Image: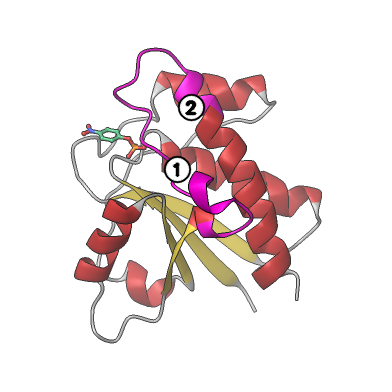
Amino acid sequence: MVRKVLMICLGNICRSPIAEVVMVDTLEKANVKDVEVDSAAIGGWHVGNRADPRAISTLQKHGLKCTHIVRQIRKQDFSEFDYIFGMDEDNMSELRRLAPKDSKAELLMLGDFGLEKKNRIIEDPYYERGAEGFETAYQQCVVACAAFMKERLQK
Ligand code: 4NP
């Protein structure tokens, strides 16, 4: 059975495209099949755009490619996806607010898998100068995606 994972952040240009690419890479390396991964935004400001150049170059530095085009979350995502991940508490409260009553998706915070409590928020690097915050987000995603895969997708 195919399982579907959706990564969400505010703009879908920084954290969630990184999380999407990292999750796909993690699954491929572990030879885990039948999982589809996508990402989307809470807000509509960047719809139709590519990811932030700093997200693309951070992934590139790690040998990964990001071709994602920004889209906004829609009602049917809550019935089509099994797991919808937010990156921080604001994302989580927005997801809970947007979720229809009959939502099938489990709403989870990505950093609750594999990361220490004090490090579990994947902070928004958009307004920071430089790409350091993108590398931090990437490293958090690597740990969290592997932990989630082991806990929920490899069983
Ligand atoms: P992201 O970062 O949620 O990690 O993609 C942001 C990108 C853009 C904006 C906010 C956060 N923005 O307000 O345009």
Instruction: Classify mark 1: helix, strand or loop.
Output: loop
In the visual, does 115 lie left or right of 83?
A: right
Question: Where residue 84 sits in the image (x, y, percent)?
Answer: 43, 64
In the visual, does 154 lie left or right of 82?
A: right
Q: Amino acid at mark 2?
A: Phe
**Is 147 placed above or below 19 here?**
below
Q: Is mark 1 within 8 Å of ligand 1?
A: no
Q: Residue at x 35, y 67 (%)?
A: 77
Numbered badge on residue 134: 2
Ligand 1 resides in the quarter of the picture at: top left
Residue farthest along the bottom direction in this orientation: 102
Identify which residue, 65 or 41, lies in the foreground.
Answer: 41
- Image: magenta residue range: 112-135
Q: Disc count in the image?
A: 2
In the visual, does 151 lie left or right of 39?
A: right
Q: Is 129 part of what is drawn in magenta?
A: yes
Identify which residue, 125 or 49, lies in the foreground.
Answer: 125
Question: Where residue 1 sits in the image (x, y, percent)?
Answer: 65, 79
Question: Where residue 53 sits in the image (x, y, percent)?
Answer: 43, 19
The numbered mark, 2 or 1, whose residue comes first in the sequence reads: 1
Check disc 1 and report the residue beneath it: 122
